[in-house]
Image (tube, helix red, strand yellow):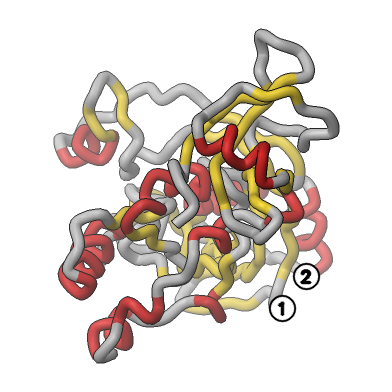
Amino acid sequence: MTSFDVVQRVRSILKTKKVGHTGTLDPDVEGVLPICVGRATKLAEYLTSERKVYEGTAAFGTSTTTEDASGEVIEESVPPALTDKKADELLKTFTGSLWQKPPMYSAVKINGKKLYEYAREGKVINRPEREITIYHLRRTAPVSSAENHTLLSFEVECSKGTYIRTLTVQFGEKLDVPAHMASLKRTRAGSFTVEDCIPLDQLKAHPHPWSFVQPAELLFPQSKGITVDSDTAEKILNGAVLPASGIPSGEWFPVYTEDGILLALYKPDSKRDGFMKPEKMYRTSID
């Protein structure tokens, strides 16, 4: 099931068109996929930029067309003799800033066309590298062997745009062996974890599925934004450019009322030092 399939099913269950997901999951990947409904859909792109955490398994010994287990095998070799110590040393070399080329089987667009569409035509397109960040990376189980592969299970916290499939291939390149991603599960997206999620079947079977919909205030921790008084809140609702001091660093930040109501996303005004301006309006009134 694709992320778009999930959106379609949620639209059908909740009987509303305004539904969007917050970061594509490959069809063979399970785990956390936050869904925005109604007015919150305008905030979906901002959750997409949040950090993600995955649990995965790299298989050394074969590489595939899709960089995961669903593709055709294109290269084979003798699996490496990898100890836990060597695996830990390997993973340490991948923390920090890295560069990746998006895989051919991905939804990234080149010249207005998705890469997987080129791939299905048998074409390989030149893809510019992208800088990504690996914040944490650790082994989660002893290195093992199965079906002519050496298997390395790991947990990774990464930035937006990171392809874990490609990361496992990069592991293999470091060891000079072909590799692919054997399995993957997203365990956290932004502040949402597996424990916060419900299966689609449970949502469909519930007599009041809207009861599972949570307030948009949960999307962004209030501690990472600013809180304003009632007078400033009225100005925020009108999209005012306002003087600001001590605002959070970064591209944007949430603005809340003293009662914890999310008003908007604001950002520093690049043209006026010491001021902030709207990045995305969420409310036009407090209802």
Q: What type is the residue that disc 2 sits on?
A: Asp
Residue behind mark 1: 142
Answer with left or right where residue 220 lies relative to residue 72: right
Quadrant housing the N terminus: bottom left
Q: Residue furthest top?
A: 271
Q: Are marks 1 and 2 in contact (CB under 8 Å)?
A: yes
Q: Is residue 193 visible?
A: yes
Question: What is the quadrant of residue 195 in the picture?
Answer: bottom right
For label 1, the crowd category at 10 Å Cα-Cα, with few meaning under 14, some 14 to 19 and many 20 or more, is some
In the image, is residue 15 above or below residue 231?
below
Residue at screen point 61% across, 33% down = 266
Task: Give the image location of residue 79, x and y in percent.
Answer: 57, 63
Residue behind mark 2: 84
Q: Secondary structure at mark 1?
A: loop
Counting labels gives 2
Task: Give the image location of residue 28, x and y in percent.
Answer: 35, 66
Question: What is the quadrant of residue 273 in the picture?
Answer: top right
Task: Give the image location of residue 211, x and y in percent.
Answer: 38, 81
Answer with left or right where residue 207 lies relative to residue 42: left
Residue at screen point 46% across, 44% down = 282
